[in-house]
Image (cartoon, rainbow, N blue to C red):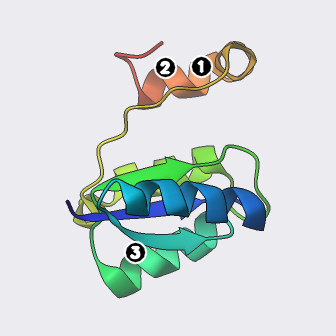
Amino acid sequence: MGTAIVIDDSRAMRSMMGRIVTQLGFDCLQAEDGQAALEALDDHGAVTVALVDWNMPRLNGLEFVRAVRADRRYGLAFNLQIWQDIIRNHHLELSHLFPHLV
């Protein structure tokens, strides 16, 4: 099916989500924050799916998405399901990144 990357600063969440995507047939990369995820993408190449936590140290989810969208070599298209309060708090930023979602 391809490769997924699970990006979350919680080791337990990465482990749980990693098991799920592996059971779905994906190879799985894991990263503890957006910066580590960019480094993993640089080492591995494009992935099929990214599961991204929003609040993380160093490089958060929004910053990760911005970096990936700015660099086409990553080849990721994002379809996000995010909490309503995040949409409300970051509406302007999100509307520029995902005009079809907000």
Callout 1: helix, strand or loop?
Answer: helix
Q: Nearer the viewer, residue 41 or 5?
A: 5
Crowd band around label 3 with a 10 angstrom C-alpha radius: few (<14), some (14–19), many (20+): some
Callout 3: helix, strand or loop?
Answer: helix
Image side of residue 17 versus residue 28, left or right = right
Residue type, numbered disc 2? Ser
Instruction: Look at the numbered discs 1 and 2 and tell me whether their residues touch, using CB distance below 8 Å.
Output: yes
Residue under numbered circle 1: 92
Residue under numbered circle 2: 95
Crowd band around label 2 with a 10 angstrom C-alpha radius: few (<14), some (14–19), many (20+): few
| Image quadrant containing the N terminus | bottom left
Percent position of residue 31, x then y = 60, 71
Q: Is residue 13 above or below residue 62?
A: below
Residue type, numbered disc 3? Leu
Dot placed on the residue nearer the N-terminal end, 3 or 1: 3
Q: Is residue 91 above or below residue 24?
A: above
Residue at mark 3 to residue at mark 2: CA–CA distance: 25 Å
Image side of residue 13 versus residue 72, left or right = right
Q: Residue furthest left?
A: 1
Residue at mark 1 to residue at mark 2: CA–CA distance: 5 Å
Q: Nearer the viewer, residue 94 or 11?
A: 11
Percent position of residue 29, x then y = 46, 73
**Residue beneath the point at 48% across and 19% down:** 95
